[in-house]
Image (cartoon, rainbow, N blue to C red):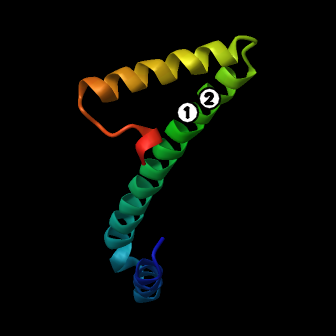
């Protein structure tokens, strides 16, 4: 939670029970931000797991060579710079 939101939450708390709805709204917004970050982290972990699975595969070298060939062909077809040229 951002410092300004923490300060606002504390101000709401100190203002008493009349601010319950405002507190709930602030917390719902913060919860959604946390869930969005969690979703992104989950996607990142899945990508890491995929890459580790490839590298742990007994045929990792063949898989990587095939992926490189596919990317190179796609870059050539789309007239994009090659990694070797960068």
Q: Tag 2: Cα neighbours inside 10 Å, few (<14), some, or many (≥20)?
A: few
Compared with residue 36, is residue 8 higher up or lower down, i.e. above or below?
below
Toward the viewer: 14 or 33?
33
Task: Using residue 51 as the reference point, say whether residue 43 is left or right of it.
Answer: left
Image quadrant of residue 18? bottom left
Toward the viewer: 39 or 48?
48
Q: Circle 2 sits on which residue?
A: 51
Q: Tag 1: Cα neighbours inside 10 Å, few (<14), some, or many (≥20)?
A: few
How far, Cα to Cα, is label 2 from label 1? 6 Å
The residue shown at (40%, 25%) is 72
The residue shown at (42%, 62%) is 30
Tell me whether the residue at label 2 lies in contact with that at label 1, contact meaning CB atoms closer than 8 angstroms: yes
Toward the viewer: 71 or 35?
71
Q: Circle 1 sits on which residue?
A: 47
In the rendering, at what x and y percent does residue 73 appear? 36, 20
Compared with residue 22, is residue 78 higher up or lower down, i.e. above or below?
above
Local SS, label 2: helix
Task: Using residue 8 as the reference point, say whether residue 77 is left or right of it.
Answer: left
Task: Using residue 65 as the reference point, say whether residue 21 is left or right of it.
Answer: left
The residue shown at (23%, 29%) is 78
Residue occupying the far left of the picture: 78
Compared with residue 73, is residue 20 higher up or lower down, i.e. above or below?
below
Image quadrant of residue 27? bottom left
């Amino acid at each position: 939670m951002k410092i300004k939101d923490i300060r606002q939450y504390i101000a709401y708390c100190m203002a008493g029970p009349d601010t319950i709805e405002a507190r709930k709204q602030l917390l719902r917004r913060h919860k959604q931000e946390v869930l969005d970050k969690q979703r992104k982290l989950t996607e990142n972990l899945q990508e890491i797991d995929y890459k580790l699975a490839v590298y742990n595969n007994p045929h990792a070298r063949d898989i990587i060579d095939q992926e490189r060939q596919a990317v190179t062909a796609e870059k050539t077809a789309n007239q994009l710079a090659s990694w070797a040229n960068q």
